[in-house]
Image (spheres, rainbow, N blue to C red):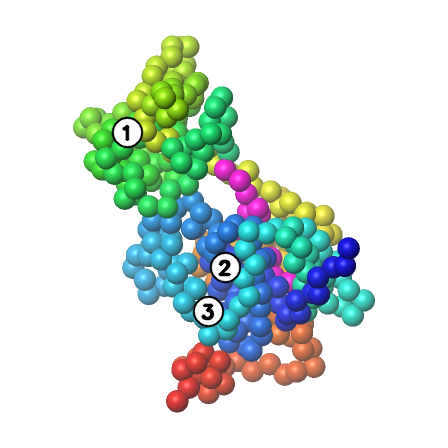
Amino acid sequence: MQLATPIETDVLIIGAGPCGLFQVFELGLLGIAAHVVDSLGHPGGQCAELYPDKPIYDIPALPVCGAQELVDRLMQQIKPFNPGFHLGQEVSQFSRREDGRFAVGTTAGTHFNAGAVVIAAGVGSFQPRRIGLEGAEAFEGATIQYRVKTAAALEGKRIVIFGGGDSALDWTLELAGKAASLALVHRRAEFRAAPASVAKMRALVSAGKVRHYEALPHSLRVAEGRLSGVCVKRPDGAIETLEAEQLLVFFGLHPKLGPIADWGIALEKRALRVDTEKFQTSVPGVFAVGDINTYPGKKKLILSGFHEAALAAYGIQHHLNPQKRQFLQYTTTSPIMHQRLGVAD
């Protein structure tokens, strides 16, 4: 079988989360073109997949910004650079070509010839941990959900939320008072979520607005082909039935580096080790930004990932054109940057 002609690009970015999208912008300012691959079917990464309505408070100049709003703003910001997006496909092949460039292939049969590669894959490819009850598969994606796009579709519903982390508590607080009934089920008394969220949840329980159960999922209740409830098992072995039209399950993710772990890149605690000058990995020409990298003092913040993308762009520029002198230009005054951004007079 003849392989498709590779797409030739200056840079291939693996991961379309906030850091990957901002990497497109920083490269575009330097006149460097990029294509983006992501295993999800839409841009935004974990932000858009798990908590699109969750407010973010530490983006400079934006006092509060929803996660999906941030993704939408980043997509608007990179429009002038017209990146190529290849969504719903994972990178499955990676090798260095004889000319020093990189041959990269995806599960969808897309092939790239890239001058440099940026890995911005967050925690790697991930899948939600499923509830694992008999018959659950038939309801997943409809009345059993592992992510929530909008609270509006859940208003007036009888809802049971499973989990003890930030996502479970965030949605409990968001839906309290909007759902017809709301129960939170967690396997133990302690929660992994932010203490402030746990305190708010306990106040809602005391006020009778939320029911809390220390229990495990046991079985589904189905009537005439529709989900009518869920049975949970308490620590003493007692089984209790909870009415439910919707189950929201937040048991966390199965994070995995996948094939990236086999690319010969130096790892440290399942993260890619990088320098802090240009955020290059141990493989020249391969860079890593965002949660997937590690270095002394690393902080897993979107803000930090944006800083890493800015420095990585200059490192990539030098890698692609090592003989060319680099000049720091400012978007406020640089005519060439104004031209690239489409704002020149």
Q: Specify few, some or many for label 1: CA neighbours under 10 Å numbering under 14, 14-19, or 20 or more.
A: many
Q: Earlier in the sequence, mark 1 or mark 2?
A: 2
**Residue 271 place in picture, x, y as percent:** 61, 48
Label 1's element?
A: strand
Residue highlighted by disc 3: 78
Question: Which residue ends up furthest to the right in the rendered image?
Answer: 98
Q: CA distance from mark 1 to mark 2?
A: 37 Å
Q: CA distance from mark 3 to mark 2?
A: 12 Å
The magenta region covers 117-128
- Per the rendering, the mark at residue 19 is 2
Q: Is residue 174 magenta?
A: no
- Which amino acid does the dot numbered 2 rest on? Cys
Residue 53 visible, this orientation: yes
Q: Nearer the viewer, residue 215 or 76?
A: 76
- Which amino acid does the dot numbered 1 rest on? Arg
Label 3's element?
A: loop
- Which amino acid does the dot numbered 3 rest on? Ile
Q: Specify few, some or many for label 3: CA neighbours under 10 Å numbering under 14, 14-19, or 20 or more.
A: many
Do residues under tags 1 and 2 come within 8 Å of each other at their CB atoms? Answer: no
Question: Which residue ends up furthest to the left in the rendered image?
Answer: 207
Residue highlighted by disc 1: 158
From what the image shows, is residue 321 above or below residue 285? below
